[in-house]
Image (cartoon, rainbow, N blue to C red):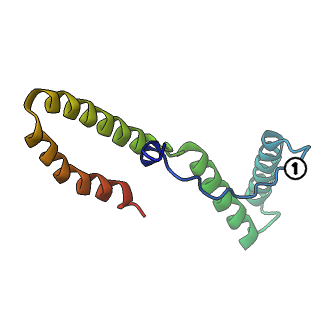
Amino acid sequence: MKFLSLFTKAPQHQRFSYRPRFYDEQKEEMQERENRIRKEIERERGIVNETQGEHRSRIAGSFHAARRRNKPLIGGNAVMIRLGVLLFLSVFIIAFLQWGKPVLYSLFLFIPVYFYLKFKSK
């Protein structure tokens, strides 16, 4: 069974994520947009001057929207490595049955490369 653990990753720590029970993200974003538009209209009329806090909320909103758009694929590269290893092992078994011990010795060249690829991200 230890052989199968070479193809799986150890579980990572889990972060605590608190989500309020009655929170409507779309409604809050809509209210922030309405407030920002009202302040822009007042600024055009000359009623209110822009403060530093308004810049911060606009910048934070931009980062939040960009983070939502650019979600990285988790585990995409790991799946490709696993498929490559399984393909290599199946080809190795076929080659070993056909040519014998020279193929077995070539496996000893592959093992360090595999462990290098497995642990290089750590």
At 78% from the left and 63% from the top, the residue drawn is: 46
At 77% from the left and 52% from the top, the residue drawn is: 41
Residue 51 seen: no
**Badge 1: how crowded within 10 Å, few (<14), some, or many (20+)?**
few
Q: Quadrant of residue 89?
A: top left
26 left or right of 84 in image: right
Q: Which amino acid lies under the numbered mark 1 shown in the image of this protein?
A: Pro
63 left or right of 92 in image: right
Q: Position of residue 70 (x, y in %)?
A: 52, 46
At 43% from the left and 64% from the top, the residue drawn is: 122
76 left or right of 114 in image: right
Q: Position of residue 39 (x, y in %)?
A: 79, 56
Callout 1 secondary element: loop
Q: Which residue is mark 1?
A: 20
Q: With respect to residue 24, does 96 lie above or below?
A: above
Q: Position of residue 6 (x, y in %)?
A: 42, 48
Q: Position of residue 54 (x, y in %)?
A: 73, 64
Q: With respect to residue 26, does 45 lie above or below?
A: below
Q: Residue furthest front?
A: 101
Q: Residue furthest right?
A: 22
At 32% from the left and 35% from the top, the residue drawn is: 86
Q: Quadrant of residue 42?
A: bottom right
